[in-house]
Image (spheres, rainbow, N blue to C red):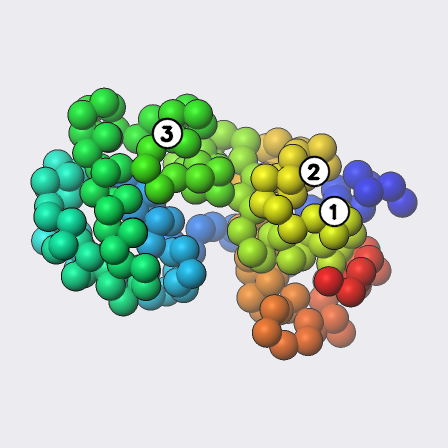
């Protein structure tokens, strides 16, 4: 079985195992996903979902958040960790959305990368979840699992993992595939315990390369 064939088989198995692929960050507008994904760095999605409720109660739209004092944003988002840098990025990002894009999130990958605090992972998440465009989100679950499965070989740098996966995963499947990897990484192919290989739907496909 080639690496490409294994990748396609894994995509189909995960589809059956996790039919409802979705981002675990809660949002109803694109700009809110931008805020949440910045807060999610080194923080759980569950905590972010709680914290942003308080943030949006006080600052309900892009304009309000753009005008908010950075210190006030930091006070609210502090439970997510790295409050100072996250607050600065959120403030600067909302200002840029307000001043350059009329409060709308651009649907162009390079323009997303120009926004403060937005890297490739965040930009791919926005492209896939908000705009329904091809995307590969290389978060920690993705990187860990595709190495264990043998889809990449000892590659840990997110941009390099993303580049390799573009060669293997059909573009229309990329976004949902990455969401399913998160589900599988949380439930079966865990990081902090030994993976539950006996319960894994990918037993016969996984290379288990000892990563």
Categorize mark 2 by other alpha carbons within 10 Å: few (<14), some (14-19), many (20+): some
Q: For mark 1, give the secondary structure.
A: loop
Residue depth check, mark 3 versus mark 1: number of the one nearer the observer: 3
Decide which of tag 3 and tag 1 comes sooner along the chain: 3
Q: Which mark is residue 152?
A: 1
Residue depth check, mark 2 versus mark 3: number of the one nearer the observer: 3
Residue that label 3 marks: 114
Q: Which mark is residue 113?
A: none
| Inter-mark Cα distance, 3 to 1 | 28 Å
Query: Camera-side residue: 140 or 49?
Result: 140
| Residue 180: percent from left, percent from top | 58, 53
Tag 1 and tag 2, C-beta contact below 8 Å: yes
| Inter-mark Cα distance, 1 to 2 | 7 Å
* Vertical position of residue 43 compared to residue 11: above or below: below
Q: Residue at x 39, y 63 (%)?
A: 43
Count up the numbered dots.
Answer: 3
Q: Is residue 128 left or right of residue 53?
A: right
Q: Residue at x 23, y 38 (%)?
A: 92
Categorize mark 3 by other alpha carbons within 10 Å: few (<14), some (14-19), many (20+): few
Q: For mark 2, give the secondary structure.
A: helix
Say which quarter of the image contains residue 97. top left
**Quadrant placement of the N terminus:** top right
Q: Is residue 7 left or right of residue 127?
A: right
| Residue 35: percent from left, percent from top | 29, 47
Q: For mark 3, give the secondary structure.
A: loop
């Amino acid at each position: 079985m080639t690496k490409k064939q294994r990748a396609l088989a894994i995509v189909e198995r995960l589809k059956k195992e996790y039919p409802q692929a979705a981002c675990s960050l809660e949002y109803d507008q694109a700009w809110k996903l931008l805020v949440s994904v910045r807060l999610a760095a080194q923080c759980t999605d569950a905590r972010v979902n709680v914290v942003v409720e308080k943030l949006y109660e006080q600052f309900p739209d892009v304009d309000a958040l753009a005008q908010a004092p950075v210190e006030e944003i930091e006070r609210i988002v502090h439970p997510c960790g790295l409050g100072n840098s996250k607050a600065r990025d959120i403030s600067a990002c909302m200002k840029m959305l307000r001043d350059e894009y009329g409060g709308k999130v651009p649907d162009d990958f390079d323009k997303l990368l120009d926004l403060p605090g937005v890297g490739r992972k965040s930009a791919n998440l926005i492209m896939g979840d908000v705009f329904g465009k091809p995307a590969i989100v290389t978060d920690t679950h993705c990187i860990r699992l595709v190495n264990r499965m043998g889809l990449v070989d000892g590659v840990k740098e997110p941009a390099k993992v993303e580049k390799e996966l573009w060669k293997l995963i059909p573009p229309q499947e990329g976004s949902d595939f990455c969401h399913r990897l998160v589900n599988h990484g949380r439930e079966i192919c865990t990081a902090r315990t030994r993976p539950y290989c006996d319960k894994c739907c990918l037993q016969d496909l996984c290379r288990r390369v000892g990563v």
